[in-house]
Image (cartoon, grey):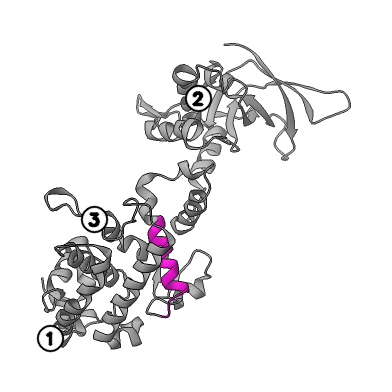
Amino acid sequence: MEKIILQANKLNQKTESEHDIYYTQIKAKDFAQNSLFVIDHYRRKDKSDLGYQRKLDSTHVDKYVRYITEETKNPIAPISVTVNCREKLAFEPLMGSSFLGHLVLDKILHIIDGQHRRAGWQYIFTHLNKDSNFDDFELPIIITSGLSEHREIETFYIINQRQKKIATDLALRHMGLLQTNSLTSGIVPQNAIWQLNALKISDVLNENLNGVWSNAIALPSDSMEERKRKLISQNTFINSMKLLFVGKRGKSKNLPVFRGKRSITDLEKQDINVYAELLSEYWSMVASVWPEAFEKPNEYLITNSVGVYSFHKCLAQKIHNLSDPSPSRYKSVLGSMEREFKKSAASQNGLKFWAKNPSVKMRSSENWAGAFSSNGGHNLIVQAISNGQVPKK
């Protein structure tokens, strides 16, 4: 346990006199290796609750290590570590200042926020840092002095329970921006590339093509009122396209329907436009078969998640069944699909099946689209409408 002296700023937050808060920086190596820093894990003992920290999650540690060492050439770590000393720390103000001075760390410091980062740096310095690349890497750190264990738990709770995660639709936009720059593209996981391609297609349908989905897909920037007026959320529309991008696995393995010329995942602008056009034509055909459902979308479920998932899955399955499933032949399946869809629509309850508020009889029998919202339900819909029938359970 080695004493550390840091130049620090003392913050004024109108705390009680025995509580002090400091903001400074510390070398990642000191944070990782100095035994002053400890973790007070939650444990149940003698019918009492002790500690508060959650167990270390190796997945979080691995992600942090990959980011620092692999995913970007110049990693940044701007989020402060937060620690507390339950005793009073010595602070020696510099001459002429009441808030800038030297803070002496010579007592146990409990890590409130930062245990996964510490574990990550421990791994880096133990296993990866042979050339001392990170010896001078510094982390911002907030140090509270004199908080009781109870106030420490309060701080942990506020940091971890009250934060709001980035909305997934906005996070996908962030990934798209990161992907366009070679310095940050490594941060985007390979298994998310298909979502970025789907996002590009979604944007073309939403912004460039005058079809069913023109200005109908809700974006992260839309207000609540705008979202209410649109047919579907960005995330639902993108996730419904998954089978078109990842193909089938297992014994009946298929290549993705939407794939690039150079590689399966590398879609160029030309590919994006071709696939967006195919989807636009496909949905225009669906709208011509069930026109009332698109004229009054608030009364039917075809443009909701159950319909969009089912119809995209239906298209993917049909193209997978082609003897030569090349992009140039994709549009050839639309004619045969239209014929089967028309049979389904013309059948008894062909339109009523998609009603958002069906009759009591249909609702009780569960033979309406709202009762087919699971993945298995989507499969039943695909099987039925592909053969000119109305889905039934």
Magenta segment boundaries in residue numbering = 196-210
Label 1 to label 3: alpha-carbon separation: 31 Å
For image coordinates 44% across by 18% down, the residue present is: 127
First along the sequence among labels 3 and 2: 2
In the image, residue 341 lies in the stretch drawn in magenta: no
Binning the other alpha carbons within 10 Å of mark 3 as few (below 14), some (14 to 19) or many (20 upward) gives some
Say which residue label 2 marks. 121
**Front one among 335 and 85:** 335
Label 2 to label 1: alpha-carbon separation: 64 Å
For image coordinates 10% across by 75% down, the residue present is: 387
First along the sequence among labels 1 and 3: 3
Question: Residue 71, labelled with which disc?
Answer: none
Give above or below for 50 relative to 193.
above
Say which residue label 3 marks. 247
Say which element carries label 3. loop
Amino acid carrying label 2: it is: Trp
For image coordinates 35% across by 24% down, the residue present is: 46
Asked if marks 3 and 2 touch (Cβ < 8 Å), the reply is no
Which quarter of the picture shows residue 158? top right
Q: Position of residue 198 (x, y in %)?
A: 38, 61
Q: Is residue 141 left or right of residue 274?
A: right
Q: Position of residue 62 (x, y in %)?
A: 41, 32
Q: Position of residue 370 (x, y in %)?
A: 24, 72
Q: Which residue sits furthest top?
A: 1
Q: How many marks?
A: 3
Binning the other alpha carbons within 10 Å of mark 2 as few (below 14), some (14 to 19) or many (20 upward) gives many
**Front one among 207 and 55:** 207
Give above or below for 120 relative to 362.
above
Say which element carries label 2. helix
Say which residue label 1 marks. 347
